[in-house]
Amino acid sequence: MNKYTPSEIEKKWQDFWDEHESFVCENNSDKEKFYALVEFPYPSGQGLHVGHPRPYTALDIVSRMKRMQGYNVLYPMGWDAFGLPTENYAIKNKIHPALVTKNNIAHFKKQLKSIGFSFDWSREINTTDPEYYKWTQWIFLQLYKKGLAYKKEMPINWCPSCKVGLSNEEVVGGKCERCGEEVVRRVKSQWMLKITEYADRLIEDLDDLDFIDRVVTQQKNWIGRSEGASINFSLKDYDEKLEVFTTRPDTIYGATYMVIAPEHPLIENHADKIENLEEINAYKAECAKKSDFERTELEKNKSGVEIKGIKAINPLTNKEIPIWISDYVLMTYGTGAIMAVPAHDDRDYDFAKKFGLNIVPVIEGSDVSEHANTETATGKMINSGILDGLEVKDAIAKMIDYLEEHKLGDRKINYKLRDWVFSRQRYWGEPIPIVHCEKCGYVALPEEELPLLLPEVENYEPTDSGESPLAKMTDWVNTTCPKCGGPAKRETDTMPQWAGSSWYFLRYTDPHNDKALASKEALEYWTPVDWYNGGMEHTTLHLLYSRFWHKFLYDIGVVPTKEPYQKRTSHGMILGGNNEKMSKSRGNVVNPDDIVRDYGADTLRCYEMFIGDFEKPVPWSENGVKGCRRFLERVWNLQEIVVDGDEYSKELVTEIHKTIKKVTEDYANLKANTAIAQLMTLSNEFSDLGKITKEDFRTFLILLNPVAPHITEELWEVCNLGGVLSEQTWPIFEEELTIDNEIEIPVQFNGKVRYTINIERDASQDTVFEIAEKDELFAKNIDGKNVVKKIYIPNKIVNIVVK
Ligand code: ANZ
Ligand code: ZN
């Protein structure tokens, strides 16, 4: 027997799979399809770290098992390659980002190949390939034609360090998600996508999907649908209204003052009536320095200024109430103005306490609570005129009816979700295929002109004015209008990194198509993706964006399903040995190349799965790696005890059937860790027995193959088990055979257990008594007395009554 040498056998089998196109799948097949998807990586300069292979291995296991179960499996891989890090690297090192991308991809691909994933590499895609982004641009044009892409002056989140506008999703805790720099506000004309038009469907259609709970919850919270009412409060002595959004119209009798956001137009529109304008402007200037996050999440101490000279009228109490300006009210939500109900809203309560404002309770026995949520608020209305005595739920309904009837307001649904800021003032992204004509305004490029290629520029630095470097390319920018032929200018903003990943799973179904993003037949056959695994950090960005695009493509008849992904799961992060997030600066990054070199790809894969529950974050441990390597060495040694035989060894039948059952179910439920534990147990039984049949070993190797594909293929060959492992069919178990047949039961004498016997399950009563009586302890326990009764409860207990 040769020594177990992964470096020799792993390359051999990887080449074999490549040559034999073992994992290339067909678009035309009678087999049932299975589409497994993992999030394609951004090919950074650092290469893979050991976090990447965790989800890839998990779905590789599912894919390999499914193939052997007879499915036509699509398990693809590609590159999400536009983006800032590459561009920044290109600027710093004066290399074209396309070249940087090419090198990074080559590195990533080599690493992935060395781990033996069963990707169908014939379908590899790259979002920066013009043949790919042609279709990203095409989708944008369709959105534009349907009025879902529009340009708007927007206060945007601006990162002064990256010199780029960020979407709300890219701002984390008031800081740039990428570089950590404090984000400031800046007004800029931006391309926007109307994702808000799909808000309801993005919530409702979640019901038919098999997404893990935390993904569903996060998506719903992000969309943030609130039902309530908009109510118009009149301003005293003005023929003008101040509109608020509230989820609690029932509490209107308790609205003792109003608050508007510092940016609310009321102030400019009525500057002449305001007596303390200077004080208000000073307060506004202070607020402008803070992000929304600081204003709402961080600021515990309420601040504000009363607007002197303007009063509002509560339309139900008809009382005059003051209007304040405070930064706890955001201009970007609802109407930027609220009716404050300090008795029943925490924020209003704190504010009223601080500034000595009136507090009028309107719900019996209910203190200030955070129950702004209509679903959790209960109680009987008091001090509330027409609502007195009603339950909150009924009071809300009645008040909305009343408001509508008296033209004081309307039923209203509000969303936290904002339209998607879709332009970036950077170079390394898809050019937006729109020109601006002096006469015709914005005009879409004709589809035949796609792809609109990124021009070569000398300098990728963004300009300080915030324009994209493309703005300096006058030759490229100046063009003619496709409509009137007059002079026009090209859009110089590019698309955000989220563009290419919003539809990539469609391209995998037909990656070389030059007539359409994919053929109807390919989409019909492969979509939806059966199982998509990805990081929790992509729940509110990528997952929502791609569901939006897919729904849009469904609406215009391009894709056959209304949802892109049937099932969504998510993995926990792999942490450094010190339990901290792996990062270069913490010096705790583990490079999978080192593990492959020192222990082998199979050990890496096995450990990635054995490390712990798939959904939980877990620290890396070199000892764990060694443990997996020792397990594989024991498996390697099993070849010494294999003897001829096309049936399972009698002693192993139960354990083998049990193992097939457990492993099959565990793999399908992302529990490869417990599947591996079961395979360890079985391999120990093999060793204890000292001799196993070829059939014992075949089943064992097939079951282990998805986790450790190289060593199992090699052993299959070495032991002459017939053909190639990856072409075998998955073993099936018989439920009856998974049950242990020999069982141990107690023998009682006059109700006391004296010894136990081993019997065959369901043995006859006579046989059981015979076994019980044969035991030497039987005579001892009779002790010369008479047996008056023998009772047997099948498979449970024997009871002997003596006198
Ligand atoms: C009166 C009231 C009484 C409210 C009460 C709550 C509880 P969600 O659920 O998040 O939609 N609000 C409305 N617009 C706002 C803005 N631009 N900035 C800050 N707060 C705003 O919350 C809706 C509630 O948040 C609204 O209902 C409003 O306060 C406040 F016992 O109106 B409520
Ligand atoms: Zn024109």
Image (cartoon, rainbow, N blue to C red):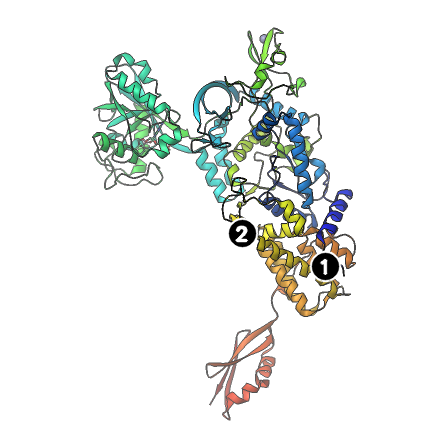
Locate the N terminus by quadrant: bottom right
Residue at x-position 64% and y-position 16%: 446
Q: CA distance from mark 1 to mark 2?
A: 28 Å
The amino acid type found where label 1 is placed reads: Arg
The circle on residue 25 is none
Q: Which mark is residue 698?
A: 1
Q: Position of residue 159 (x, y in %)?
A: 48, 26
| Disc 2 target residue | 613
Q: Is residue 516 visible?
A: no
Observer-nearest of 687 and 756: 687
Mark closer to the observer (1, 2): 2
Classify mark 2: helix, strand or loop.
loop
Farthest residue, direction bottom = 784
Mark 2 vs ligand 1: CB under 8 Å?
Answer: no
Q: Is residue 642 left or right of residue 292?
A: right
Can you say whether 329 is above or below 236 in the image?
Answer: below
Disc 1 crowd rating (10 Å Cα; few below 14, some 14-19, many 20+) is many
